[in-house]
Amino acid sequence: MIVDPRAILMFGANVLLFYLMLLVNSGLAAWSIYLFLLGPMLVLPVIYLRHSSYFVCTLATGLWVDAALPATFGLFTLGFLVAGAFIFQIRFRFRAEHNYHLILLAHAVNFFCILLVTLFMGLSFLANGGFWMQLAVTILTSHLVLLLVAPWFFNLQRLLFSLCRLDSEPDEFPTL
Amino acid sequence: MAKLRLDKIKPLVALGVFLLAWWIVPTATKSIFRVSFDEFQAPAWITVSFLDDLEGFWARRSHSKLELIEAGRELARAKSMYQFSAQRTETLEAEIERLESILNLPSRREFRYEVARVVRRDLNAWWQQIVIRKGRDFDIPEGAAVVFAGGVVGRVVEVNAFTSRVELVTSPNFRMAANFQGDERPVVYRGVPQTGFGQPIGSVADAPQDINTTERNPLKLVSTRLGGTFPPGLLIGRVPWLEPGSTGIFQSGEVELDPQLLSLYEVAVLIPLQPIQLEDDDR
């Protein structure tokens, strides 16, 4: 098979996470709280899949996110692929069997995405104190929630692999 | 050894090729991608909205008959009051038309109202938008004004098959022509980045020097027909203070907006009976 079936499952899980994120944000709008939880979407495809499958999964996820958010089209697609290419280079350094490294990666990618969207969408408001205040609240709440969401999300993806009788170990990892 | 090196740079090569392809691909193709992915997601949001309606329906079904009779009675009272208001509005409109014809005034822009449910709110530091459950299927035009019981909501910025995206007045990218109630001189309203604490705010600029306002009796900022998108007299917000602007010729200040803007459930889109010409509007 050209694309690893796990890539399709991961894309499905990403869509679910994104949908839940927007649903919660819609409900929290009255309290001016916004959860930005895109970080975990990139982690498992980069760590688990071969390059072609990771690329297809990340590209589809990026386009999905870009279509739903009013940011410049392609911002998240390109951002995911840039971050993904960097992590892919050093992926052997991370331990995939536990969530510890994966959660750290999710936080790093999430922060990178926030930085990216701030640079591209908020450059004209950088002098405004209100913008920084809301951005600080967004970063703080998002990363606090990510501490709970990221392990749940990674375990959900692994559960989906086992339910579909797919390999739950990363590809191309060196064996001792 | 050579294979190993090629493997190492494979992600970077793929990324470079993709970036080049993305740069070469025409905007129309990207636009097709965006619309396709967006339309694919729309049914999920519409379903949630309908499920929300269904939940409301079943919640109302659980009310007792006595509660329903009481609600019906209140509704009948409100209906008779609104019937009287409608009659009075008709009389006043006829009077306005008569006076306009006597004075040979130019005709006003007429609108029809399309009430739409809010499917999703997307409010953050970078953008302030909502998605409503009506789109091209109800002839919603891009640039149309959106209002609610408390006044101006924003402007339609994107229309899809069954949904539309509305930019709120709180958005830093939003601006419109306005005037103070009782003063015909135009001023400029702009959205500003929200702090996330307290009620939503905006800013007003180019206010004449002789306008005074106080926190106890704040002036009302209303829409003007100058932009062409909004009918005149719709409340935008209240201005508690004004201070001299950077030029010293005009004043600028803060606009307190309705807090309900952040939790809207239903809005009305004003669809002009004559098509909107976006280049004429103050976008």
Image: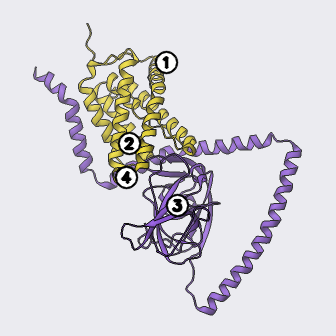
Chain colours: A yellow, B purple
Q: Chain of mark 4?
A: A
Q: Going 53% across and 71% down the picture, which residue do you hit?
A: B212
Q: Are marks 1 and 3 in contact (CB under 8 Å)?
A: no
Q: Are marks 3 and 4 on the same chain?
A: no
Query: How far separated are the C-alphas under marks 1 and 4?
Result: 47 Å
Q: Nearer the viewer, mark 2 or mark 1?
A: 2
Query: How far separated are the C-alphas under marks 2 and 1?
Result: 27 Å
- The quadrant holding residue A114 is top left
Q: Chain of mark 1?
A: A
Q: Are marks 2 and 1 on the same chain?
A: yes
Nearest the viewer among A43 and B214 is B214
Circle 4 SS class = helix
Circle 1 SS class = helix
To which residue does mark 1 refer? Answer: A163
Q: Are marks 1 and 4 on the same chain?
A: yes
- The quadrant holding residue B173 is bottom left
To which residue does mark 4 refer? Answer: A125
To which residue does mark 2 refer? Answer: A63
Image: A73 above or below B217? above
Q: Position of residue B43 (x, y in %)?
A: 54, 45
Q: Nearer the viewer, mark 1 or mark 4?
A: 4
The mark that comes first in sequence, 4 or 2, is 2
Q: Position of residue A31 (x, y in %)?
A: 56, 43
Q: Are marks 1 and 3 on the same chain?
A: no
Circle 3 SS class = strand
Image: A52 above or below A23? above
Q: Left or right: B77 with respect to B280?
A: right
Q: Where does the C terminus of chain B fall, quadrant-wise?
A: bottom left
Q: Could you tell me the amino acid type at mark 4? A: Phe
- Residue B255, disc: 3
